[in-house]
Image (spheres, rainbow, N blue to C red):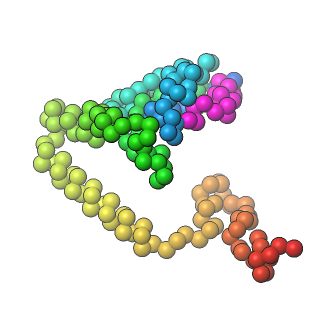
Amino acid sequence: GAANQGQLFEALNMAALWKLPLVYVCENNQYGMGTSKKRSSANDDYYTRGHYVPGIKVDGMNVLSVREATKFVKDYAINHGPIVVEMDTYRYHGHSMSDPGITYRNRDEVAGVRATRDPVERTKRYCFETGLVSEAEVKEIEKAVKAEVSEAVEYAKNAPFPKPEELYSDIYVGQSPDFFMRGSDFTVSHGKYGVTA
């Protein structure tokens, strides 16, 4: 996917040249749309591809590993410059609504990852094994989370659509410049009767 685009290498070069305090995060979910990383990348160890920008690889489905890696790369970037962190993760579903996700992999692969690497289940197991929480406490947390999510979904469904100007909110410090959004006013973009002269 995106890790094979030229812009990435240009950005890495400039960040290294200027020693910018940047953390580049590569979310490696094993597939670029419907193509396996092995079929699309000459080097699929993405964290090694920065050449002059160091990188690390972390199990992106292990909450504690991600936390520790995040601390490390933040500190590194602040003190030394750019760094790449490859999060080794997995995409359970297809790439989009039109992609069922089963033409380039099988259900057993997805089920196997879910059974062994799912971050929520792994974290719950860790918490049970170490005595941090009980199963009853987790059930209460899950119940509260489901209620909060349901409430947020209902709010979103019933909320009025935002005004088009909101697209530019909180993008600039201070006053946003005046923008004309093409297509926002039919008479401006297509003339009074939808026909441009």
- The residue at 76%/70% (across/down) is 189
Which residue in the rendered view is the most extreme toward the bottom?
193
Horizontal relation, residue 40 to residue 57: left or right:
right
Residue 183's spot in the image, x, y percent? 70, 68
Q: Residue at x 42, y 30 (%)?
A: 88
Residue extent of the magenta highlight: 1-16
Question: How many numbered marks does the figure carry?
Answer: 0
Q: Quadrant of residue 29?
A: top left
Q: Pinpoint residue 103: horizontal percent, then vertical percent.
A: 43, 41
In the picture, measured across the screen, residue 104 lies left or right of residue 128, that is: right
Percent from the top left, x then y, of residue 165? 63, 67
167 and 95: which one is in front?
95
Identify which residue is drawn at 67% across, 34% down: 7
Tell me the quadrant of the picture where the C terminus can be found: bottom right
Q: Report if residue 87 is visible in the image.
A: yes
Could you say which quadrant of the image residue 67 lies in? top left
Q: Of 69 and 27, which appears nearest the observer?
A: 27
Predominant secondary structure, magenta span: helix
Residue 16: percent from the left, percent from the top?
65, 24
Identity of the residue drawn at 21% across and 33% down: 126
**Which residue is farthest right?**
197
